[in-house]
Image (cartoon, grey):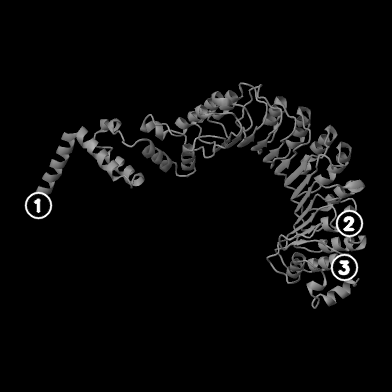
Amino acid sequence: MPSSLDYNALAATICVEDITDGAVNQETLRLLKANDTSLTYLCLCEEKNESEPGYYHPGSSEELSWLGHFTKNSTNENLKEFIVQGSDVFKKCDQQSVGRFFEDIGGCNHIETMQFCYADLSEIIYKLGPVMRNNNIAHFQMEECHLGPGKSHFFNVFSGMKSLVELSIECEDNWTDLNDAVMVGCIPALATCSAMQYLSLMNLGFGISSYVALSANFHRMTCLRELDLQRNSINDECVEVLVRGLAECKHLFRLNLKFNMIGDDGLDVLIRRLPASVDYLNLEMNQVTLARQPSLLRFEELNLGCNPLSCGGARIIAASLANPECCLEVLCIHGINFVDEGAAILAESLRCNRRLTTMWFEQSDITITGWNAFSSVLCNAESINATHSSNHTLQRLGADGFPQEFELLLRLNSNEDKSRVAATKILLAHRHLDMTPFFEQELDLLPYVVAWLERFAESRPDLKLCSIFEFVRATPMKVTNMVAGKTKGEKRKLNS
């Protein structure tokens, strides 16, 4: 195998066809060698992938060495992502070439994202140090990987990653070797990543000891903005422990706790004690019933989907939505059996709501009867004033089987010009505009009515003429006197 000096000497003249076979492998090497800016990632896979350049299956130690050489020396600043996908990526390469390859990857200063998917890292875990200590690595993602006996070493390497902004580790149920005892010792190393903003630790076998360790280290994660702890068997007791530390995370604004075991006590703690900065909370697939009638005012986005809400759940949610202080903009309540009665209660709560733009309702056993309750909320046709006061905020009503005519109303609401939304609904709901309420002020309001029609009803000149006619018919003497006065004034002007 050539020495490092030999690679430098041969790189300019060697053909990629002499290094590897397979069209995708060759094109990936060619792009690397040419510093082609269209190459944005390098993905090592366990089988030859015929999808697109950027994928590479190393067929020998020498191939891997050339790949590392071209990657290390690349001046392509668009090459920002390195991926290892599969367990047998390096099965045709010796350990020496694998170690040298990761040293080369660590020397590529353009790479910002590292991703390992479905990989057995037990044989290469001690070789990852040079890569993970690359000062430019900002995003590290590991999905369903086996770490082996070197897992403590793996986590300790994070303590040197000062530029790390995002860390995501997700394990599979049947292929994880992480547990509470292991994670207790690993968590302090994560807390040293002082630039960390996004932390996702999913299905890592946490127990109460891990949550104590996390809580004790949250105060060191001063930049943390998003925390994802899905599938970690978090119950109400664990929430109590976590919130003690999270209270110090003053920049945290998104918290994802879906697929856990949190009940009403845990929800109450989260509402009362999370820092004020948290405006997104995901509790999908937990054990929340809302039996304690909590206030849901503080969050901008809340997911309670697939929770076993009590029979009064709809009324409790509606009470918050009807409150003028409610901050909710997105509410996910899918997978809950509200039926038509619950739909009507929730619809009524939106009549004066001016914040909620999205409500997800899938799998809620609501029929056309329940959906009709939303119709009068979105466009109340009882009178022009009622239509004008309808809900012009709700834009998405994710659901199964709601009437298609709702699509138009929801689409109208997406317009930021709410005056135009109201006007369009008025013109849709009222083919004839009753001017009677305006007659008390005689002709004083007529110019405003005409201006409104000219702005919003350009395609309805008949409506403008009919409205003017109604004013004239209702106040004939006023119109006659006005016209006579105008004519008289014009004659005096001519005589002068």
Q: Residue furthest left?
A: 495
| Of 207 and 284, the residue lying toward us | 284
- The CA distance from mark 1 to mark 2 is 101 Å
Look at mark 3 in the image and give the residue it sits on: 62
Query: Any mark on residue 136, and which?
Result: none
Instruction: Pinpoint residue 160: horizontal percent, then vertical percent.
Output: 84, 53
Query: Any mark on residue 494, and which?
Result: 1
Q: Is residue 225 left or right of residue 118?
A: left
Look at mark 2 in the image and give the residue it sits on: 127
Residue 44, by quadrant, is bottom right
Q: Amino acid at mark 3?
A: Glu
Q: Amino acid at mark 2?
A: Lys
Q: Is residue 398 left or right of residue 173?
A: left
- Do we see residue 319 in this rendering? no
Residue 325, by quadrant, is top right
Give yes or no for contact between labels 1 and 3 (Cβ–Cβ under 8 Å). Answer: no
Q: Earlier in the sequence, mark 1 or mark 3?
A: 3
Please determine whether, in this image, residue 319 is positioned above or below residue 42.
above
Instruction: Pinpoint residue 412: horizontal percent, then vertical percent.
Output: 46, 42
Q: Amino acid at mark 1?
A: Leu
**Count the marks: how many?**
3
Instruction: Pinpoint residue 135: horizontal percent, then vertical percent.
Output: 79, 58
Tag 2: Cα neighbours inside 10 Å, few (<14), some, or many (≥20)? some
Give yes or no for contact between labels 1 and 2 (Cβ–Cβ under 8 Å). Answer: no
The residue at the point 76 percent across, 47 percent down is 168
| Of 45 and 77, the residue lying toward us | 45
Instruction: Pinpoint residue 81: horizontal percent, then vertical percent.
Output: 74, 58
Q: Secondary structure at mark 1?
A: helix
Q: Secondary structure at mark 2?
A: helix
- The CA distance from mark 3 to mark 2 is 18 Å
Which quadrant is home to the N terminus?
A: bottom right
